[in-house]
Amino acid sequence: MALEATETEKPDIQARRGPADLPVALLLAMRPKQWTKNLFVFAGLLFTNNIPLSFADGARWQKVGVTMLAFLLFCLVSGSIYLMNDVADREKDRLHPTKRLRPIASGRLPWQIAAAASVIFGWGGIAVSFLLPWRFGAVILGYYLLQIAYTYALKHMVLIDVFAIAAGFLLRAVGGSFAIEVPISAWLLVCMFQLALFLGFGKRRHEIVSLAEDARKHRQILSQYSETFIDQLIAIVLGGLIVSYAIYSIMSPTAVLHPSLVMSLPCVMYGCFRYLYLIHIEHKGGSPETILLEDRPMQINLALWVITVIAAFKITG
């Protein structure tokens, strides 16, 4: 019934659609809200003392510009993946209470145009990425291939689906450091990987709770998870994340050079606990990027964390 109703609504949507609406629909289908995930690209810039404090610091401003370009390329390539994913899932999305409103599922954006744009944006972004250091281009290519594998295979494998999502976050951080040719701490990468797992399992939990009996219809892999199982995984990953960051901020080579980095640990702990509160008490977590854009305590905490990290590097830099 839901699918039939959606199909009957599509001609009306198409009738209202004008030429000017297609670019807007295309942009929305690329999910710009989720581009906040690409902020992981800035990890290399932030944690290697490369943020300029003076406009005269030309070398560091150049690294900022390169990192911004890397961020935009990840946005372009990840946007192409979202288009590909929505084209592949358009029939299932029409059964979902909110995803049925997405431009492709609703018929606002023809899937043929979305598919063509996905190829152009994806491979175009990859081609441009090789104009930066070749290792960055290799990471972008690897990220693109990983997301294709996720769309058509990995997302149907229990646990592997979340690990694939986490690997995407890790590639963003590694790519950002390769773009400006700076090293990045292995401990920091461990923290980022565990953070991505935490967010991924939180998203799966939200899907199971919010969709209830319809969860299997929307995403078959959800039948292999349970709320209790995911809560155990979240507890394990969250504990590992906090311990790993504590070790990174106290004992890593970076921390030895910048002892004040440990001051950022309370911000990390609060952020984790706040997100856990949002998952269990306010029943959010299905969209981490939305939480970041809308939850004021998380925004303030993130700003304090960034300020603390920069201050720690500048005090001993």
Image (tube, rainbow, N blue to C red):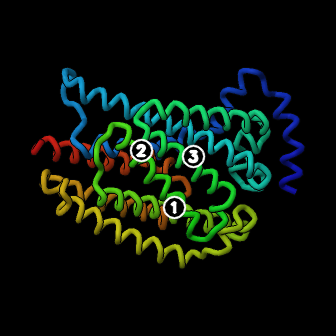
Kindly identify which numbered label has been placed on residue 175: 2
Q: Residue furthest front?
A: 134
Residue 248 lies left or right of residue 8; in this view the side is: left
Q: Amino acid at mark 1?
A: Gly
Q: Residue at x 76, y 55 (%)?
A: 92
Q: Nearer the viewer, mark 3 or mark 1?
A: 3
Residue 161 lies left or right of residue 43; in this view the side is: right
Residue at which label 1 appears: 200
Q: Quadrant of the C terminus?
A: top left
Residue at which label 3 appears: 144
Q: Position of residue 229 (x, y in %)?
A: 54, 78
Q: Position of residue 113 (x, y in %)?
A: 75, 33
Q: Nearer the viewer, mark 1 or mark 2?
A: 2
Q: Residue at x 85, y 39 (%)?
A: 10
Q: CA distance from mark 1 to mark 2?
A: 20 Å
Residue 311 higher or lower than 108, as above or below: below
Q: Amino acid at mark 2?
A: Gly
Q: Residues within 10 Å of mark 2 (few under 14, many from 20)?
A: many
Q: Nearer the viewer, residue 280 or 289?
A: 289
Mark 2 or 3, nearer chain start: 3
Mark 1 or 2, nearer chain start: 2
Q: CA distance from mark 3 to mark 1?
A: 19 Å
